[in-house]
Image (spheres, rainbow, N blue to C red):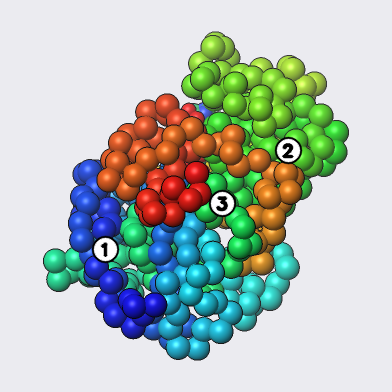
Amino acid sequence: MATAGKVIKCRAAVAWEPNAPLMMEEIEVAPPQEGEIRIKVVATGVCHTDLYHLFEGKDKRGFPTVLGHEGAGVVESVGPGVTDFKPGDKVIPLFLSQCGECKFCKCPKTNLCDCSWSSKYYDIMSDPTTRFTCHGRPILQFMGTSTFSEYTVINQIAVAKIHDDAPLDRVCLLGCGISTGYGAAVNTAGVTPGSVCAVFGLGAVGLAAVMGCKNAGASRIFAVDINEQKFEKAKVFGATDFLNPKAYNKPISEVLAELTNGGVDFSLECVGNTEVMRTALESCVKGWGVSVLVGWTDVKDFSAKPIQLISGKTWKGSLFGGFKSKDSVPNLVCDYMTGKIKLDEFITHKMSLEQVNDAINLMKTGDCIRLIIIADHSCCAMLL
Ligand code: NAD
Ligand code: ZN
């Protein structure tokens, strides 16, 4: 490759500060160092966690940054010591690494690799080390990935090599939202055949949770959202019942208890709202109900009455659907290619990197499920 070993100048959407539009800039992307891979980003989704950092996290130390963590691309070059990847390989960047060596990677109970930015830098949501500069300033790599850029550099422990025939403009969704929601149902909640489930929040994460409940054999799946436009899609993924909490003059947990003879077996919170987290727990049946927090928020405490847990319910949380990232993402890509999981149905819009602020606004208003930003138009014609 003509660019190997050199600094690449390319376009990226830089978030200079919280609460402000992203700016299209020319950035410099340094060559990959020991154990690192430089990736040409082809396509990327926009996830609510990007919006969370921009609008809700508000920790100024997490800026300037390049957002984006739901991408797919092609290896441009590799740094010293990288033997499992070569230029041209199709890859998915992983916001949660899997080093394979730490005590968490070695334990089958968790996917929380200790080498991930998330073990030390939750507050700023990126490792302070970066390969990006712009106008002479270092630019952080949000969630270690920064896919709102034409190129990015990632440690090999946070990159999954995927099937050569995988369509990158769809499988990029497995870099976050779909793996997260799906895994939260099948891995973290452990949804069982014949069970009754409720999913709160029907963005891509919640819809993927619905798909997980359905694939795990749930007999009834309540889809709960304050935006009724989402119900039609929820049906496509297997939801059987639809509830808008705003349409009732009593708590939706009471409505669910009445409809299910005491509450659901499994509930999943896919909004990122501490009140909804509480409601999801209260919607579970006593004795064995399991509620999983999937929505991302770190700004407020959450609460519930202790009797909720004393009565035998379990409250859990899930990062990246409990999937060990590097091992699982290639398999999930194959599950999509063989029809076991859906991806196309999540995609409502396609846009260019220049339209990234429109994309963020669409996510904000809820008039989309997933929009795919095509960062590389030359690959785009080939892929669409
Ligand atoms: P999204 O914005 O597309 O969807 C959120 C949905 O919640 C919308 O349909 C909205 O109408 C609905 N909603 C809002 N308030 C509600 C309420 N009070 N009751 C019911 N529904 C309500 O978001 P997304 O991209 O699907 O992400 C969902 C959440 O998952 C976010 O918090 C995101 O940060 C988080 N997330 C977590 C992980 C993880 O690993 N745990 C990974 C990815 C995303
Ligand atoms: Zn995400």
Which sits earlier in the primary sequence, circle 3 or circle 2? 3
Query: Quick one: label 2 or label 1, which is nearer the N terminus?
Result: 1
Residue located at (48% from left, 74% from top): 87
Residue assigned mark 2: 213
Label 2 to label 1: alpha-carbon separation: 41 Å
Residue 59 visible to an observer of this rendering: yes
The residue carrying mark 3 is 167
Going from N to C along the chain, the mark reached first, 3 or 1, is 1
Question: Where is residue 195 shown, x and y percent of the image?
Answer: 81, 34
Q: Nearer the viewer, mark 2 or mark 1?
A: 1
Q: Quadrant of residue 46?
A: top left
Compared to residue 155, the image places residue 367 above or below, namely above
The residue at the far bottom in this view is 81
Q: Tell me the CA gap for discs 3 and 1.
A: 23 Å
Q: Note whether 183 is above or below 39 in the view shown.
A: above
Question: Quick one: label 2, few (<14), some, or many (20+) residues within 10 Å?
Answer: many
Q: Is residue 364 visible?
A: no
**Which-is-in-front pick, marks 3 and 2?**
3
Q: Is residue 225 left or right of residue 223?
A: left
Query: Where is residue 280 shown, x and y percent of the image?
Result: 61, 33
Q: Is mark 1 within 8 Å of ligand 2?
A: no
- Whether residue 317 sits left or right of residue 348 in the image: it is right
Mark 3: is the Cβ under 8 angstroms from ligand 2? no
Relative image position of residue 50 (x, y in whole percent)? 39, 48
The percent position of residue 97, horizontal first and vertical second, equals: 54, 68
x 48%, y 51%: residue? 382
- Residue linked to disc 1: 10
Q: Residues within 10 Å of mark 1 (few under 14, many from 20)?
A: some
Closer to us: 159 or 2: 2
Task: Bin the neighbour count of mark 3 within 10 Å (Cα to Cα): few under 14, some 14-19, many 20 and up.
Answer: some
